[in-house]
Image: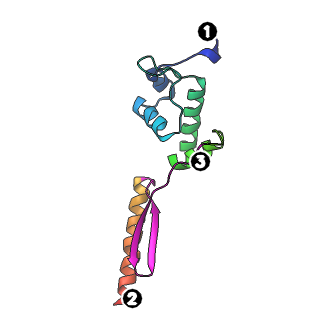
């Protein structure tokens, strides 16, 4: 079988990339990776899946989060695809102060943002007192 025709099962693809099978499934669910070319019990993945996963891993090692990776990879995806929806959390800190924060930030970043908002809120309340 020629290299271009080679295919992998999910377990083989996971072993080849060092990723857990559930991570690969998650990337498919997030739209970062196309589903298998053959679905079901005999699911098959191609060299393009392997290349895409390697690109995702490289972008992660460069420090990008999955939402950013999706935007970078969208340049190589079909032009008619809709962008991933973005959800926001809104914090009304005072009548005239509203802050919006994306919900897809990394957990450590979300904690930093909440801590900063608490500190900012304390400053606002101290000046109003």
Residue range corresponding to the magenta coloring:
81-106
Tell us which disc is closer to us: 1 or 2.
Answer: 1
The image position of residue 98, as x and y in percent, is 44, 74
Earlier along the polypeptide chain: callout 1 or callout 3? 1
Residue shown at 61% from the left, 42% from the top:
73
Taking the view exactly as shown, the residue that stands out farthest to the bottom is 129
Q: What is the quadrant of the C terminus in the image? A: bottom left
Relative to 34, say whether 94 is above or below. Answer: below
CA gap, disc 1 to disc 2?
73 Å
Q: What secondary structure is found at the residue carrying circle 3? A: helix
Q: Is residue 98 magenta?
A: yes
Taking the view exactly as shown, the residue that stands out farthest to the top is 1
Q: Image quarter for residue 50?
A: top right
Relative to 121, say whether 127 is above or below. Answer: below
Relative to 101, say whether 66 is above or below. Answer: above
Task: Identify the disc placed on residue 127.
Answer: 2
Q: Residues within 10 Å of mark 3 (few under 14, many from 20)?
A: some
CA gap, disc 1 to disc 3?
35 Å
Relative to 45, say whether 33 is above or below. Answer: below
Task: Identify the disc placed on residue 1.
Answer: 1
User: Mark 3 — residue?
Assistant: 71
Front-lying residue, 85 or 99? 85
Q: What secondary structure is found at the residue carrying circle 1? A: loop
Tell us which disc is closer to us: 2 or 3.
Answer: 3
From this viewpoint, is residue 65 visible?
no
Q: Image quarter for residue 23?
A: top left
Residue shown at 44% from the left, 78% from the top:
97
């Amino acid at each position: 079988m020629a290299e271009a025709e080679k295919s992998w099962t999910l377990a083989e693809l996971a072993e080849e990339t060092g990723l857990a099978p559930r991570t690969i499934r998650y990337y498919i669910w997030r739209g970062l990776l196309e589903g298998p070319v053959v679905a079901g019990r005999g699911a098959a993945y191609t060299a393009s899946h392997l290349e895409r996963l390697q690109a995702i891993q490289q972008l992660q090692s460069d420090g990008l989060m999955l939402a950013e990776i999706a935007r970078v990879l969208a340049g190589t995806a079909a032009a008619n695809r809709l962008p991933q929806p973005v959800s926001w959390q809104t914090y009304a800190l005072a009548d005239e102060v509203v802050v919006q924060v994306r919900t897809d930030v990394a957990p450590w970043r979300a904690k930093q943002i909440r801590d900063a908002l608490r500190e900012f809120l304390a400053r606002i309340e101290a000046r109003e007192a």
